Every structure is written in C-alpha cells, then in structure tokens.
C-alpha cells in the first residue's frame, strides 16, 4: 500500500510503542471518526466498543483478518487490522468461508437488521431509559454502571455484525454495476440507492415540520426571526403560543436528540443542549416551502427509479443469472443504504449518548464526594479509577484530572501521521473487505494542480460558493444558504446543515462515508477525503466544488 | 418426401424451416437444411431461409409472421449464412461466414442479409473455400433468419470428444449468454465430459468465465461477466446430460458424429445448429 503524508507542515509526533511488538504492525489513524485527542474514558470506550465489536464482526463473517487492534498513541486513535497469514490453500479456504458467510448475510440484510439487531438494541435502550440515574443508591448505581459497559460491548458487537455486510453490500453492488456498465461514472451506481426513507431523512423532515408550525404562529415566527439560537427558548417562554411550541420542540429533541456532535463523549447531546437543533430550525423558518426536504427526497426517489429502469433496460438481453445477480445485489444495497443511516441513529448516537449520561451522573456523585470539580472531569479518568473511587469515596482526583487536561491540550497541537508502524510492502489484496475499506475511508488523494484540491467524488454536481471552514456543529449558525461546508469530517447530527449548504468538502472519508451518503440524499455536490481542505482553504474564500470529478477549485 | 410439394414450392424464394422443401441442402444450404430436417420434432427456434434474390416486401412479410409467433412487433432475430456446401461432412464453416445476432426491424434485417451475402465473397471465406477444395459460390447465398434465443447459457456439444475420439466421451462446453463467445474462443467455457455409455459425468471443469455475449440494441455485444458469477457453473449437470443425450440421439439418427450448438432459456433447451464433426474425418485420413 503506498501512502503519503499530506500534512502541509509535519510537526514532531513522539513515538514510543507501549508494546514493542506493535512496531511490526501497520497502524492507521482514523481522522474521519476521531480527529481530536481522546480523553482517557474515550480511549477505554473505544477499546470496549470499536475494538471488541470490530473483532467480533470480523470473526462472525470469517473475514481473512487475524485480529483488530486499537491503540491510543499520543492521545490519537490508531487501528490495525492484522491480516491472516497461511499457505495459499489455507487462505483460499478462508476466502471461501468469508464469501459464503457474506453471501448469506447479503441475502437477508433487512431481516438481520429489522428482525434481529434492532429489537435487541431497543431492549438495551429500555435498560438505560428506565433507570433513575440520580436517585439510585450508590450500590445500585455502580451495578448499573458495570452493566452499562457489558451492554455497550454487546451493542457494538451488533453494530459490526450489521455494518460489515451492509457496507459490503453497497461496495459490491458498486463493483457489480461498474463491471456491467464499464462506461459508468464513479457515482452512477449510487443513484440507484438514493431517496429511500431512513432515520437521517426523518430527523430532517420532522425539523422541517416544526419550522412550518413555527411560521404558522406569528408570535413564534417573530421569535425565530429576531433572536439568536441561544435566546430562542427564553423568548418563546414569554407567550402562550411560544410555550406550546416549546413543548413540541422538547418532544422533538426527546425523540431525535439523543445524539452528540461527532463520535465523542465530550460533546453534549441535543437533549442537554438543543442549540444546534434550534440553529437549524431558525434557518428552516427562513426558507420557502419549495426547499422542503421532502421535495429533495422525492426528486432523489424519482431519479433513483429512472436510473433503475435504465439499468434494467440495458440488462434486458442479459442471461437470467446475471439479471438475478443484479436484482439481488440491488435489493441488498438498497436495504444497506437505509441501514447505513439508521444504525448511526440507533447504535452510534444512542449508545454514546447513554454512556455519556451514565458517566456524567457518576461525575456528579464524584463532585459531591469532593473528588473532582466538574462532572465532566469524569472523562479524564479510566473506568477502573472511576469504579474504585465510586466504591471507596475519599480520594482527591483533582491533580490527576488537571494533569490529564493539560496533556490533552498539548496533544491537540500535534498532527497525527496518517499511518505508523510497518507499512506493508505488498499492494492491498483485491478482496471485498479491502475494497470496502478504500471506499469508506477514501484512497489517498491524487495531487492537484495549483489552485486545485483533489479528493474522492462524493456526490454529483458542480457548485460555486463561499467556503465555511467549520470544526464543530456549534459553528452551524455561520452557514448561510448556498455556503460550502468545509470540515474535517461531518457527523450524523450535522445533517440538517446539508439542507442549507450548497456543497460539502471534507478532509476524510470515501464515497461510502456518511458525509457522501447524506450529500447524495440531499442532492448537493460533495468532494470527500481531500486530506487537507480545512488547512488549505481559507474561511470566506470563493471555491468551486466539482462533485463528479472530486475536484475543488479556488476561484 | 413428396415430389409434388417440391414442385409447388420450388419457386418460393423464402422457405420456412418446418417446410419439407427447406430440408434440401441444395436449396437452403447445409446449415438450414440440417435444422429444417429436425424442426418438426426438436426445439429449434422458428425461422425462415431467404433462398434467392427476393422483393424486400416478401422478406418483410416473413419477418412480420415471425414476429407474430414471438408475440412481438419487432422481434430480435439472428441472421446466419447457410452456404449450400456449408456444414457439409467435409468442412465446417464455423465462423467463416457472417453471423449477425440481435437484428431488430426490417431495415436492420435487410442490411444484415446483404452483409451475410457479401461475406460469402470475403477474402477470408474465399481463402477458406480454396483451402478446403470448395468451389466459389455462384448464386446468392441462402440466409437463415431465426428468432434470437434469450440465452441464459449456451453450449457446444460434441457427440465424440474430438481431441480423444477413443475415450468414449461426449463433450459439453458451456458458458453464460449466447454461444458466440464459446465459438469465437473469447471465453474459456465450463467443460463436462460424459460417458457415451451411460451419460455419467466423468469430468467437470468449472472455468473462470470472463466474457459473455449478450443481446443488445443494434445487435449483440461481448461484455464482462460479473465477478461473482465467473466461477459459478453456467449450466447444471442435468442440463449438460440433456444436451449430451440430444447429441447422441442425433448422431444415431444421422449416422455420423455431430457437433451441436444449443442454448437455454431457463430450463428450456433450444437446438441452434447441428453438423458433422469434420475434424474426425481429417484425423482418420491423416
């Protein structure tokens, strides 16, 4: 695998292997999900969710991967998929096992998700929803915390049992489509998967409905037209109509707001701080009916049906096994597209939301004990320290917390290299798992001309607009209609911004990344995986995004 | 055969395959005549032979009638040359004369018939004829027009293994789609060797089949086989056995080893071509 370091000015990244054997492995940083240094509790969470769950999924599908290792190096998340080794015969046998396992799963994706995984996830959510974190006795609280970790691990096993075949379905459908139609562009196969109902779309449409309700009430509408997002709840509270609307807004946040900004424990859920949702709502109130997300979804659905009809017509003279393969993979990829969004809502967002809630409740208990200053200091501890302190109050953890906060601040200035350890000398194998990884994480971008930045084609179309370089959803208010979002990565809670933006550009990700999938749903151009957009493009610059070619031009 | 029928039809420039007159190789060419002699009892795609120069209107009428049988206004057809000495026992013209698949509409059909006839005089065909001691054709070439089979898979079947004639094997070479990729050698087909005695599968080799010929607007096209299907069997053992049985039946009836081209739509078998295995005679002579 050839890799290149694309950071404009590499900073020293001190490297001391925790285990000397790690130096022999090939480590990849995952800036798409974890661009920032991790707090100790986050590192522990990733070990128990991502590390354990990924390994479980790999074994469940007999993937030719020996094991998945994750490490936190200088605060940054690194991951190594250790490939299986063996004689050619052993490898071929493993490949056949993996293919059979995956083929079985692809044929029943919807059943796997709706029939098996989601019901179990809902049962875990009931466990968290039904527990009174504040009033429980210390003993019962500690038991709840312990069980939270156990259930979290199980939820993330289910996560990978679901996403591995789901993303393989989309990736392999794309391979099949381009094999059948060699003249197809890089985004053409995804047109057959657009505009399907999913939770991401539902969250946006429900917010749009709220904005229409706000417009219908002059008192409510005035509040949204004249106040900043942070002031809106207080202003609404002043009138009866406003209070009624506030109740609807709370229902919305309760239903859809168990989601933090990015995959971190450190950011509040909308249930804690609904400002990002109110920010989007404030923007929606200013938009005409013709901008309704439903209009875009309908257009995407119509485009999807046209693309499917066209493909079927082109396959009319093909042998039945080929047509059968196409129809089977299309159905699997469509189910997978919905699952790729819905699993974020039900698993990623919900499980991190609940873990954060339990840990903050633990933090409040430690504050009462005098062990830490702020409830959020709990994230600076590791799970063992937390367990010990809850069991035997009296320790003063303030010096440890202060030291670790300072360490994280220092780590923030580092630029983590994309890869560490021993870089493989052989090209990556051409198997479904590797092809999927390339499309999810993105391939290293090709160098562009001057005033030009290259990435992967993410969503079709060309648009010119003002670049808004944003690092967190709290900056959402700066995005005016038609602006181009330039971000390291976009997490699921950012999606309402896609209704406002003219296009989106990211440093990380590939054609199957969440950002690219959602951009296609919203019908806006996207270029993903540029590696350097947020450092090369200046806020306010006029740029042109060509989503088909994967090129950004600085105008 | 009834000679009065012969006299009645003698001046018809278009002969349907089920017409007894079409069984005359002198009139319809070797390929069409062989099929015509089997048309009344074997699953041969319906079609007609354009024997002589003829008013295009007559061809259009025949094409419409063919379309009626297929339930289509503009049926997809295959147009093949059927030189009077082609598919005879001494020389196989496989691939030497034009075959045009996926022809749709009367204009395309007239052009395809013209192209087929022109190919009889092509340098390649004339060279082949000279090399095999055949005369240069004088009159117009008979051209066979048949409904194009919607082939899920196709096979070439040899009632005697032409490579090892004494092995007592029937050989079936099969691949996805129309048979052109097998005949043209652009795909390595799956191979079944079945015993002539009991039609047991002696060997089965599933190949990595990278290419296939499919029906496409304006003709046929050779395309890549999707990766997931390449190493899957193109037909079942049951289908291979059925094709082998047909080859033995025809060999028995005609009295010489035969080489068939067959195709399947689902489980329905179609016989597309039947001719002697010419290389066996050459080997015996050598």
Image: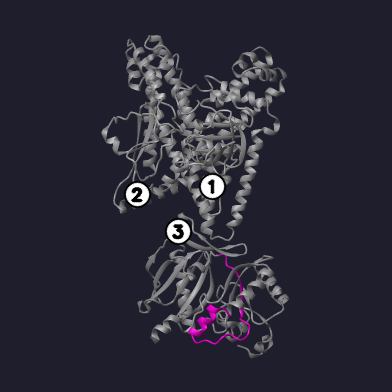
Name the residue rendered at 36%, 41% in the picture.
A59
Range drawn in magenta: B121-150
Residue B82 picture quarter = bottom right
Left-right relation of A3 to B14? left
Is the residue B76 above or below the residue A214 in the image? below
Residue B282's x, y, as percent? 42, 84
Name the residue rendered at 70%, 23% in the picture.
A215
Residue underneath mark 3: B230
Residue B17 in view (yes/no): no
Q: Residues within 10 Å of mark 1 (few under 14, many from 20)?
A: some
Name the residue rendered at 45%, 61% in the picture.
B209
Residue A10 picture quarter = top left
Of mark 2 and mark 1, the one earlier in the sequence is: 2
- Asked if residue B137 lies in the magenta stretch, the reply is yes
Where's the C terminus of chain A, which quadrant? top right
Give SS at disc 3. helix
> In this orientation, which residue lies closer to the viewer: A431 or B6?
A431
Residue B213 in view (yes/no): yes
Left-right relation of A83 to A375? left
Task: Residue A186: give its label.
Answer: 1
- Chain under numbered label 2: A
Task: Residue A94: give its label.
Answer: 2
């Amino acid at each position: 695998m050839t890799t290149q370091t694309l950071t404009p000015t590499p900073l020293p990244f001190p490297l001391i292997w925790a285990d000397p054997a790690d130096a022999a492995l090939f480590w990849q940083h995952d800036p798409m999900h974890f661009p920032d240094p991790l707090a100790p509790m986050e590192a522990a969470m990733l070990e128990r969710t991502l590390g354990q769950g990924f390994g479980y999924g790999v074994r469940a599908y007999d993937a030719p991967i020996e094991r998945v290792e994750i490490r936190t190096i200088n605060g940054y998340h690194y991951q190594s998929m250790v490939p299986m080794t063996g004689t050619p015969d052993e490898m071929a046998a493993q490949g056949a096992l993996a293919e059979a396992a995956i083929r079985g799963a692809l044929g029943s994706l919807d059943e796997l998700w709706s029939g098996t995984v989601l019901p179990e996830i809902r049962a875990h959510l009931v466990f968290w929803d039904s527990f009174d974190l504040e009033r429980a006795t210390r003993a019962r609280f500690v038991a709840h915390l312990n069980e939270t970790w156990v259930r979290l691990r199980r939820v993330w096993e289910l996560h990978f049992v679901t996403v591995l075949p789901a993303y393989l379905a989309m990736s392999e459908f794309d391979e099949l489509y381009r094999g059948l139609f060699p003249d197809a562009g890089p985004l053409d196969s995804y047109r057959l998967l657009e505009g399907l109902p999913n939770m991401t779309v539902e969250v946006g449409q429900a917010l749009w409905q709220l904005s229409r309700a706000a417009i219908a009430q002059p008192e409510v509408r005035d509040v949204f037209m004249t106040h900043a997002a942070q002031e809106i709840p207080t202003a609404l509270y002043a009138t009866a109509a406003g209070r009624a609307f506030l109740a609807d807004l709370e229902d919305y946040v309760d239903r859809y707001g168990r989601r933090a900004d990015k995959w971190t424990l450190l950011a509040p859920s909308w249930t804690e701080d609904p400002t990002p949702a109110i920010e989007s709502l404030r923007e929606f109130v200013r938009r005409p009916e013709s901008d309704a997300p439903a209009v875009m979804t309908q257009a995407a659905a119509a485009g999807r049906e046209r693309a499917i009809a066209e493909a079927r017509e082109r396959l009319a003279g093909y042998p039945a096994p080929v047509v059968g393969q196409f129809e089977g993979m299309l159905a699997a990829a469509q189910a997978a597209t919905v699952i790729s969004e819905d699993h974020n809502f039900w698993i990623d967002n919900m499980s991190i939301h609940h873990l954060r809630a339990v840990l903050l409740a633990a933090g409040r208990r430690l504050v009462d004990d005098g062990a830490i200053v702020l409830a959020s200091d709990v994230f600076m501890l590791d799970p063992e320290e937390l367990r010990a302190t809850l069991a035997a109050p009296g320790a003063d953890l303030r010096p440890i917390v202060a030291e670790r906060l300072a360490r994280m601040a220092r780590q923030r200035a580092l630029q983590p290299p994309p890869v560490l350890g021993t870089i493989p000398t052989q090209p990556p194998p051409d198997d479904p798992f590797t092809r999927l990884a390339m499309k999810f994480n993105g391939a290293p971008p090709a160098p562009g001309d001057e005033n030009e930045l290259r990435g992967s084609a993410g969503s079709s179309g060309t648009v010119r607009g003002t670049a808004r370089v944003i690092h967190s959803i709290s900056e959402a208010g700066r995005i005016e209609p038609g602006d181009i979002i330039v971000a390291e990565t976009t997490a699921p809670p950012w999606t309402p911004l896609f209704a406002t933006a003219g296009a989106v550009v990211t440093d990380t990700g590939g054609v199957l990344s969440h950002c690219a999938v959602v951009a296609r749903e919203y019908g806006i151009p996207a270029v993903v995986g540029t590696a350097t957009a947020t450092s090369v493009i200046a806020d306010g610059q006029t740029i042109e995004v060509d989503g088909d070619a994967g090129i950004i031009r600085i105008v | 055969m009834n000679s009065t029928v012969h006299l009645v039809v003698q001046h018809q420039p278009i002969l349907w395959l089920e017409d007894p007159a079409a069984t005359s190789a002198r009139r319809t060419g070797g390929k069409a005549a062989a099929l015509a002699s089997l048309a009344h009892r074997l699953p041969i795609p319906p079609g007609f032979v354009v024997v002589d120069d003829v008013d295009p209107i007559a061809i259009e009428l025949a094409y419409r009638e063919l379309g009626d049988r297929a339930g289509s206004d503009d049926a997809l057809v295959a147009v093949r040359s059927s030189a009077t000495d082609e598919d005879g026992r001494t020389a196989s013209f496989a691939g030497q004369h034009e075959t045009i698949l996926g022809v749709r509409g009367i204009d395309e059909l007239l052009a395809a018939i013209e192209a087929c006839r022109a190919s009889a005089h092509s340098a390649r065909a004339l060279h082949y004829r000279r090399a095999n001691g055949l005369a240069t054709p004088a009159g117009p070439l008979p051209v066979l027009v048949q409904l194009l089979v919607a082939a899920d898979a196709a096979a070439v079947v040899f009632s005697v293994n032409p490579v090892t004639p004494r092995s007592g094997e029937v050989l079936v070479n099969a691949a996805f789609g129309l048979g052109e990729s097998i005949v043209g050698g652009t795909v390595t087909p799956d191979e079944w060797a079945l015993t002539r005695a009991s039609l047991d599968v002696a060997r089965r080799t599933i190949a990595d089949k990278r290419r296939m010929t499919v029906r496409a607007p304006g003709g046929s096209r050779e395309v890549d086989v999707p990766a997931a299907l390449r190493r899957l069997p193109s037909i079942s053992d049951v289908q291979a056995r059925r094709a082998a049985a047909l080859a033995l039946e025809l060999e028995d009836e005609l009295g010489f080893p035969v080489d068939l081209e067959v195709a399947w739509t689902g489980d329905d078998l179609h016989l597309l071509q039947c001719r002697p295995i010419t290389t066996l005679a050459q080997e015996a002579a050598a």
